Image (tube, coloured by chain):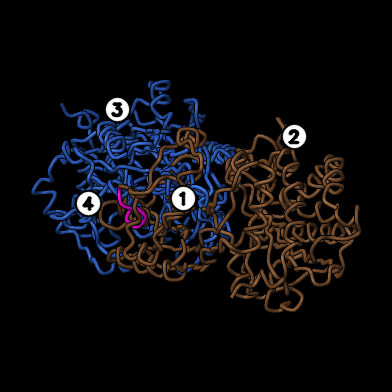
Chain colours: A brown, B blue
Amino acid sequence: MILSVLDFLHAEHSGIVSRLDTLLRIPSVSPDPQFAPHMQAARAYLRERLRDIGLSNVCELDGGGEPAVFGEWLGAPGKPTIMVYGHYDVQPADPVELWETPAFEPTYKDGRVYARGASDVKGSTVIALEVIAAFLKVHGALPVNVKVFLEGEEETGSPTLPAIIDRYRDRLDVDAVLSADGGRASATVPTINMGARGAGQLEFRVTTAGKDLHSGRYGGCVRNALHEMAVIVASLHRPDGTVAVPGFYADATAPTQRQRDDTAAFPFDPSAFFGDIDAIAHGEPGYTVREQITLRPALDINGMWGGYTGEGGKTIIPNTARAKLTVRTVPGQTSEAVLQAVERHLHTVCREGVQLEILHRFDGAPASTLAPAHPLVRAAEQVLTAEFGKTPLHVRLGASVPITSLFKTRLGVDTLMFGYNLPDEDVHAPNEFFRLTSITQGVRGWAQLLEALGAFPKAAFHPQ
Amino acid sequence: MILSVLDFLHAEHSGIVSRLDTLLRIPSVSPDPQFAPHMQAARAYLRERLRDIGLSNVCELDGGGEPAVFGEWLGAPGKPTIMVYGHYDVQPADPVELWETPAFEPTYKDGRVYARGASDVKGSTVIALEVIAAFLKVHGALPVNVKVFLEGEEETGSPTLPAIIDRYRDRLDVDAVLSADGGRASATVPTINMGARGAGQLEFRVTTAGKDLHSGRYGGCVRNALHEMAVIVASLHRPDGTVAVPGFYADATAPTQRQRDDTAAFPFDPSAFFGDIDAIAHGEPGYTVREQITLRPALDINGMWGGYTGEGGKTIIPNTARAKLTVRTVPGQTSEAVLQAVERHLHTVCREGVQLEILHRFDGAPASTLAPAHPLVRAAEQVLTAEFGKTPLHVRLGASVPITSLFKTRLGVDTLMFGYNLPDEDVHAPNEFFRLTSITQGVRGWAQLLEALGAFPKAAFHPQ
């Protein structure tokens, strides 16, 4: 059954690229409300595509935010039912002026397609859909039952995904989730994503006066909101790169020996890694770089601003300043507790005469972990060992995939991240790209994985 | 001669307000190049007005930037020649959303006119022009020769004023300067501005990587430009409010006993001063608030920004951040030396792996000082003593008036700041306003001052 599907997918390559191209041209930017009509257009396109593929009950699942697009094929009674997860939303293209080609006009160069969302995660989403299409086209059947679920809020932290899951729980009854999000760690070394860091966000404002003040008239006798913001932000880290917030690391589970071993076994070239981004290594002492970004928590300011930022000068003492931050958490931590520790710290370091307001706090997903004996892991090991001729390493992902823990806590099922994007593809940054070879490899991997999962009994997906 | 002029000005009040209104409606914002056509419109209006008043040789003096508007009346041979200085440019209206009424649609409320530039310094500029107009209308003559010089670059630090002065030196030959800029310290206590702090500006950027990075993929192993900017800005001040830049205070002349006495004699209510701006006192220990803002130097960040500042969140590690700062200097200091000390400090505190670039440095005017025996001071003392029935206090201005030192160094003449704006009028901030009573008082003051100056021989203006 599988060989004819792989042949079909091989022959279909240019058609797959052309359908990815169509999806990339829709600027489905979820964090910016201005793009709402394009979000709608992306959903309309995907509904039609799912129907063309041959899925049933194609519809939008609405939780009060950006709806998810849904479709299913349930023609394999007794076989496990797999949710195929992807997301159709993308990050803003800002800073737009740093893109060498327009973010929403896919450009093909050196075997890559450049566009916002190419790597995160329209490329891998299209791979999953094409494999389902191929099975149905060639055989009129899939090795497992499939429910396709394409989210529209991954880039905003999935605010209404819990509501969608709760509202459509019956329709989302599955044995496991295969996610097109959460990419590969390497193009040459096979790896299995055993989990991801969690995330949480906070936005805050400091205010030092009722209005901006003339720096000549008041300079030297009042606080300046930018000085205060700088003192607060500077207090978040020690010079050695450790997060200085009291209690920040308290609940973080220490890495196991196997985690440290597999992390060490993963080929990693620090000079290429840092050379590529023109930066130097700077992080928590006592951990390797890959441990720092996959097994240890982190805190980063994502935006900070206040005062006059236009052309020329403006001689003011700004009265207010704002900052956005994210925390990345590991197993043992909850972003709720970590953000509470950050909030307490902000209030502690905020000085007399300075008003501190938390404008927005979002307790994102906790970190996720997959059991090594789970059919998702065993099937992936089987496929990747066959494709690469070597046993895959267990790795963890530094970025967060909120859906993994949501599906675990609300649907009781585990998720395997099986995206084909690679770490250097500038996701969330200008000139994001996806490799066309990843499409070739991805459709082979997904086709064999669905086939392998069909060999496991349903019960194996639900260990006690 | 003076009484009929004062009567004329009294009768002309509503006409004066209407002409100020016309000028305020022209958004002559010099720091933002987008407003260049409005700068041109302001000049066209003023040229016509100077001709209407009866001045000769009305023209624009061009130094390669925004030209100054010029006109003269030289019908009093043997009498001193006074340059009447004002500026027609204004600060940007940002943040526009905090204005209660449109910045360039003058609004009249509670005896005030609200508009950008009303206080700084179109109000006082119109006062000076109206007094000249009144003398010429009533008597066909002025008590002194007058050269009107209206600058268009005061709010950008007068970058081409030196070139204008050098190019038109002959036309600008005067005995002293009367400036409409540099306002009153109080509405009830007569004061004479004996000088002003100097100013300098610096804009810099820190860069930590070649591009913005995904905070999941890189969070915990690289520097963040916003953290680095925060550390640098936080290092500029000590917690007690002292500037921490080595050498910052080194050349500052210590306040004299008379300066400290006159500063202490000036009525000052800290609770009203700080209550009005909803801020607390915070400055260099060992000095009173008024000493901090007039007799001591200061350093303020005017703008600081980097990363994502739009709606929602963006999980990036920003690779670059920028800041603008101004220094305020006192006699003994040069902004050049002070800014060099700041630059050295920035480079010293900038950490490994962080690239620091000075994008822009502007060595503005040094602080200025007027001799107590100068005719400008004596004439002002005479006028103010008569108007208020008490001897004026000598005070200094915290804000900078670059022209004062330029006229001193390039034309060899002293400047008296005799503007009628008051410190609480929100200059450089939203909802700037000017009091209509200041027009009434201002035209009386200026008319009598021109009369008093006419009694001094030319030689008295040039002490050895």
The numbered mark, 3 or 4, whose residue comes first in the sequence reads 3
Check disc 4 and report its element: helix, strand or loop: loop
Mark 1 near mark 2, Cβ–Cβ under 8 Å? no
Residue under numbered circle 3 = B78
Circle 3 residues within 10 Å: few <14, some 14–19, many ≥20:
few
Which chain does tag 4 point to?
B
Residue under numbered circle 2 = A108
Residue A293 shows which numbered tag? Answer: 1
| Amino acid at dot 1 | Ile
Badge 3 and badge 4 both on one subunit: yes
Circle 4 residues within 10 Å: few <14, some 14–19, many ≥20:
few
Residue under numbered circle 4 = B238
Residue A440 shows which numbered tag? Answer: none
Q: Quadrant of residue A14?
A: top right
In the image, is residue B56 above or below residue B323? above
Q: Which residues are magenta?
A: A232-239
Q: CA distance from mark 2 to mark 4?
A: 53 Å
Badge 4 and badge 1 both on one subunit: no
Q: Position of residue B44 (x, y in %)?
A: 58, 37
In the image, is residue B212 above or below residue B311? above
Q: CA distance from mark 4 to mark 1?
A: 34 Å
Mark 3 near mark 1, Cβ–Cβ under 8 Å? no
Q: Residue at x 51, y 61 (%)?
A: A199
Q: Quarter holding the C terminus of chain A?
A: bottom right
> Magenta-highlighted stretch: main secondary structure?
loop
Q: Is residue B413 visible?
A: yes
Q: CA distance from mark 3 to mark 2?
A: 80 Å
Q: Is residue B288 magenta?
A: no
Q: CA distance from mark 1 to mark 2?
A: 31 Å
Which chain does tag 3 point to?
B
| Amino acid at dot 4 | Arg
Of residues B336 and B219, the one nearer the viewer is B219
